[in-house]
Amino acid sequence: MPNNAQLTRDGDTLRFSGVIDRAAVIALWPTARRGLAQIRQLDLHAVQGVDSAGLALLAELAGQLRPAAGERLCGTPPGLAELCAAYRLSPTLDFNAPAAAS
């Protein structure tokens, strides 16, 4: 199945579409990193699915976004919540360290 993932820049937003999987990450990574300093938000509304490689890309990008008022991510593609839970990431892709035992 051909990969249909795309990435476009719209002002201070990176808009992803298609399936963000391992093959897509390899193709999208160079484009996603260019000009990241001006990006404030990742738009995932048009993402049809994400795998663990896609999650790694999104988490890395989200961690490098300029601090700004509002959400760093908008949209929740199928499978993202489950992957976040499995890798102990918050819905904003921040790492949730386990609570220390008393």
Image: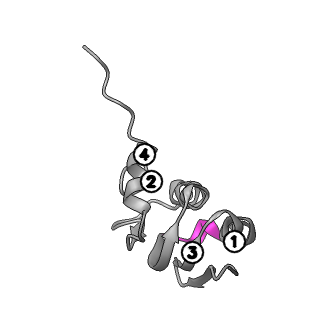
Residue 98: quarter of image = top left
**Which residue range is magenta in the image?**
34-40
* Left or right of 99 in this view: 84: right
Residue 100 on image: x %, y % = 32, 21
Residue 3 on image: x %, y % = 67, 79
Residues tagged 1 and 2 counted as in contact (Cβ below 8 A): no
Residue type, numbered disc 2: Leu
Which mark lies nearer to you, 3 or 1? Answer: 3
Above or below, 99 relative to 59: above
Which residue carries the number 4 mark? 86
Residues tagged 4 and 3 counted as in contact (Cβ below 8 A): no
Q: Nearer the viewer, residue 63 or 27?
A: 27
SS type, badge 3? strand
Residue 78: quarter of image = bottom left
Residues tagged 2 and 4 counted as in contact (Cβ below 8 A): yes
Residue 25 on image: x %, y % = 67, 65
Residues tagged 3 and 1 counted as in contact (Cβ below 8 A): no
Mark 1 Cα shell of 10 Å, populated few (<14), some (14-19), many (≥20):
some
Separation (CA) of disc 2 from disc 4? 5 Å
Which residue carries the number 2 mark? 83
SS type, badge 2? helix
Residue type, numbered disc 4: Ala
